[in-house]
Image (spheres, helix red, strand yellow):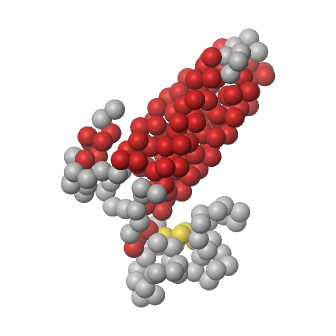
Amino acid sequence: MRVEEIIAAHPDVKGGTANLLIAAIEETLSCAQTCTSCADACLAEDMVERLRQCVRLCLDCADICATTGLLATRRTGSNAQLIAQMLSVCATACHLCAEECERHATMHDHCRICAEACRACADACQRAIGDVGGGPSDRVVGSAGNDPGQDAGAAIDVPEGMDIGDDGPDGAGRSTAI
């Protein structure tokens, strides 16, 4: 792919690229295609009813991988916190999809191929999380290290139970800077 080349040519990047993030972008976009193809192949199988959960997880994984890859490709501005969270969610989706595909891998070669792609993508996403740097605009309002007078961006509420890794300004709610 030309991911590294196009990102390196971006005016805000000025030639420097994060190699682990580039690898994750390539894996997410490849995995999205593989999961979509696997779901389609599952639908063509005679025993499609037994593959219902596999189809669901493949399609969920494909959407999450595609979104993660596209978000991580953008270089204008900064959104490191969101990218790191998406990489984590993507790794989880890939793990779940790989487990389900492995259940069918001995009977369906497309499931074996998809499980392998999902494992590779999950690994690449986990490695890339540390490659994503954050700036002041990526910090949570009220989190440690923020200057109280600093405008950290608008805060959004995050649904209860969704772990974004930081508490809101008062420690009770969940919010993050955008």
- The residue positioned 63% from the left and 17% from the top of the image is 109
Residue 56 coordinates in the image, percent (x, y): 68, 33
Residue placed most toward the observer, 17 or 63: 17
Number of disc labels = 0
Location of residue 25 by image quarter:
top left
Residue 90 coordinates in the image, percent (x, y): 56, 46
Tell me: 48 left or right of 81.
Answer: right
Residue 2 coordinates in the image, percent (x, y): 30, 35
Q: Is 162 placed above or below 2 here?
A: below
- The residue positioned 71% from the left and 15% from the top of the image is 107
Q: Residue furthest bottom?
A: 149
Q: Residue furthest right?
A: 50
Residue placed most toward the observer, 5 or 70: 5
Quarter of the image containing the N terminus? top left
Q: Is 25 placed above or below 43 here?
A: below
Q: Is residue 33 visible?
A: yes
Residue 95 coordinates in the image, percent (x, y): 64, 40
- The residue positioned 26% from the left and 42% from the top of the image is 6
Residue placed most toward the observer, 77 or 7: 7
- The residue positioned 58% from the left and 23% from the top of the image is 113
Q: Is residue 36 visible?
A: no
